[in-house]
Image (cartoon, coloured by chain):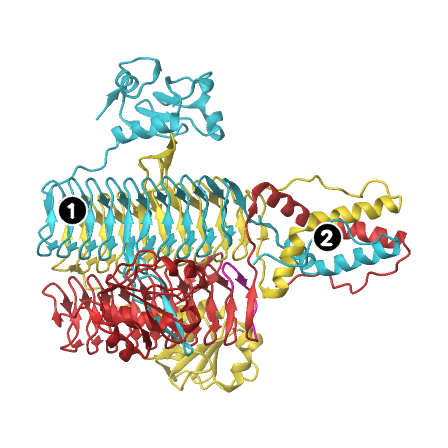
Chain colours: A red, B yellow, C cyan
Amino acid sequence: MPVSLGELAVRFGCELRGDPDRCIERVASLANADERSLAFLANPRYRPQLAETHAAAVVLSGRDAAGCPASLLLCANPYATYARIATLLHPPPPLAPGVHATALIGAGARIDPSAEIGAYSSVAPGVSVGARAFVGPHCQLAAGVTLAEDVRLVARVTLGQGVQVGARSVLQPGVVIGADGFGFAPEKGTWLKVPQVGSVRLGADVEVGANTTIDRGAIEDTVIEEGVKLDNLIMIAHNVRIGAHTAIAACTGISGSTSIGRRCMIGGMVGFAGHLSIADDVVITAKSSVSHSIANAGVYSSTLPTEEAHAWRRLVARFKRSGLLEERLRRLERAAGIKGAPMEAPEEGHD
Amino acid sequence: MPVSLGELAVRFGCELRGDPDRCIERVASLANADERSLAFLANPRYRPQLAETHAAAVVLSGRDAAGCPASLLLCANPYATYARIATLLHPPPPLAPGVHATALIGAGARIDPSAEIGAYSSVAPGVSVGARAFVGPHCQLAAGVTLAEDVRLVARVTLGQGVQVGARSVLQPGVVIGADGFGFAPEKGTWLKVPQVGSVRLGADVEVGANTTIDRGAIEDTVIEEGVKLDNLIMIAHNVRIGAHTAIAACTGISGSTSIGRRCMIGGMVGFAGHLSIADDVVITAKSSVSHSIANAGVYSSTLPTEEAHAWRRLVARFKRSGLLEERLRRLERAAGIKGAPMEAPEEGHD
Amino acid sequence: MPVSLGELAVRFGCELRGDPDRCIERVASLANADERSLAFLANPRYRPQLAETHAAAVVLSGRDAAGCPASLLLCANPYATYARIATLLHPPPPLAPGVHATALIGAGARIDPSAEIGAYSSVAPGVSVGARAFVGPHCQLAAGVTLAEDVRLVARVTLGQGVQVGARSVLQPGVVIGADGFGFAPEKGTWLKVPQVGSVRLGADVEVGANTTIDRGAIEDTVIEEGVKLDNLIMIAHNVRIGAHTAIAACTGISGSTSIGRRCMIGGMVGFAGHLSIADDVVITAKSSVSHSIANAGVYSSTLPTEEAHAWRRLVARFKRSGLLEERLRRLERAAGIKGAPMEAPEEGHD
């Protein structure tokens, strides 16, 4: 499906510098593009590749235009414009509306005729599947699940009882939404399972990455608001709430009843304790441990960057004898006749 | 299935303060309960909601009884009592004994007539499924798998050859038990796969959370004792042993041949090195790194709580130049005529 | 399939000390072996068990031969030799070539007649399955997937469009390869999905552990070179490249476009930032945070070992007031007339 540069410029509001009749067939990286490809430049890291590219055209901002041999599509947000052009050139496969012969559809399920239900999927009684929704192969939709229009379950997605998925949301393979939350009451040295009677509600335009799990609420629902983007292998515990347009990188875990604000950006492998409240517009760097609520927007971290291992072990050893350092300081202060350390903080830790 | 407060009080040994004929239909949170709902109070965090609740009844302990407008069910362990009442009011869906028409049952598999095998499950030859066990849709049970009575595989659970699951255990969707352990012998710069010929044994009353994996043993079995509760996305490597009634939060990983004691509580995203021995009744805080054996009960931690990012980076920089601090201390000590630092610890780190 | 010690010695190039006609039926641990079992000794941790073993024979190196009551198979690399013998004694189940009656095969898929396609698997049009490949039950192979000869998808593996798997690679249950990378362009406070048009290429002899995910490339492919071994629950983001014969332990995450060298050994639960370049022969200890490129072979760490929790909290508190310590040092230096601290490093942190 080739498209001319002129059409792309008009359609996506770019300034074109080059031949409007030149046709584009696909997207490519600056380094590997050919004369039928469109590339883009958004990350300054790749600017050195600009002069050498063989792309037919490059999407970029005006300040990067100099010295590029290709045709240019100038715009304010090259990455977003690239995303739109790439979607045009590489559309998802078209739906084949209808129910596959091997799919099992329970009594009373309402499947919109424009939706597609894939091979070996099982849809329980009372499920509702909206217009143009895609349920890929090997999905399981338990009773009461609701998929809004244009939802896309790529393949092998499991949705527990009553899970609601908002319009245009995309769930990657292996996702489990609505498994039981981790609720157990201690009693005489053993654990008694607490029924998890809430469910999970996902807003519109949510993305859930491969093998991510979102547990059902203990009593009320776990809630993922509109526009939230979740990467792979993330764990969202029962009764968590994630505010709109927050993005979370892979392998992060959020403990029960914690509430994350809107427009937050959470790095990978971050851990959140339970029952916290995180403000809007908070950024957490990768691998941090969030053990307290955060009341104000800003960037927070407890990331410890790697060192050469022998040097690292010396640092850790020194850290672990830091009490001796303080003791030596105090002795010196006494010897120097300095009474009382300045600005002494109380000897106690967080949490 | 409404139940009267009087019946609940008798059945669960509570002291009732209120109308014994009042009927309860469901559980709810204190904040959102209505006149047909039962709530509970166990976590002091929610006590302020007590005075405002519209619940028909609240399960709580005697010391919290004052000032609650609802009927009261007084007991010593409100959370456990709530769990039992919630199970009564919200029972799991009843079994439909028998084998779904699309399930594949291998030769010689023994399926108790009271068990249910769901759609598109495949049960290999020689599998044994006990009374009232539930095998949900899309499960795979390899040869020699044994499920005791009342086991519940919610959906899409994979059990490798010879895996044994004890009575009443619950396995959430996406669980993989009995995949090959990560065993490779180094040889001339490459890795040679070591056959993993052990299996996995789960005791009674074990819970395994969504997408958790438990690998088969290299030679002998990986063992999860009775009453162990595992959250989502946990990794249990080959030949690990987890003692009875230990609970482990999400995203934790336990390396090969490590043995964890009984009644331990392990936080989320904790990492255990291999070949360790952890005592009974050990608590590990979230995100800690356990790289040595722990011989005594107690609480252990290496959690680093998050700070504002600029402040954090200054702390890390200071940490990394801590050798300079010691040097400056030594110089001061020499200048002050103090010979030899007190209580000097050897300059070496933990491994 | 019993094998004599004489045959084993010849076949695997060992020096035999013992009866060549003694027959072995299975492998076992030193502690639990019986007179039909073969054990091995490679880890010095288990040397004390040698004198007490009831094994028929033990595979070990010459330096460990003294004091063992069993027959001996002496060799230079006992673990590798054990792996080969164990593979002989415990071979994977034989293939049943052909397509299971319930498997769905798309138009134009080329399935080698010696391959086996398991129950309820779905194979899209245009897929190619090589000689003696095994596609276990409940797998999904999207359009254009290519499996080389002797590939083994154990069960319930999902391969997205165009994924290529090299010869003899083994993919454990729950693996997802080729899900969309986490690519979103920020625009006016929301996120715009960036089509992920690359795919994933796995070389020969790769192992991928249970529930691990490898995302498709944004434009070009994500690449896992030959001989790479990945444990369970690992996240490989789009456009990562992992060099040949690198081994990565469970729960590790690698962010987008990071390139890892050859023959690296990465511990469990390590996090890598994006766009990094890691040299060949790098070792990273478990739970480290790699936030910068590493140019030289060596061992790197930011692991913080666990302490008793009260002691740990005091250490963290002291760490957080380390600025006060420096202030006190400066005051002492001023009082002692020492001008300027020696070797002062600039007050800034690593990113």
Q: Is residue A13 above or below residue C237?
A: below
- Mark in the foreground, 1 or 2: 2
Q: Amino acid at mark 1?
A: Val
Q: Please give the label number shown on residue B299.
A: none
| Chain letter for the residue marked with disc 2 in the picture | C
User: In this figure, which residue is indicated by the disc labeled 1?
Assistant: C129
User: In this figure, which residue is indicated by the disc labeled 2?
Assistant: C344
- At 55% from the left and 81% from the top, the residue drawn is B48
C230 relative to A278 in the view: left or right: left
Quarter of the image with the C terminus of chain C is: bottom right
Q: Is residue C194 above or below residue B246?
A: below
Mark 1: few/some/many CA within 10 Å (<14, 14-19, 20+): many
Q: Secondary structure at mark 1?
A: strand
Q: Nearer the viewer, residue C239 or A314?
A: C239
The x and y percentages for residue C220 are 30, 56
Q: Is residue C270 visible?
A: yes
- At 58% from the left and 61% from the top, the residue drawn is B305
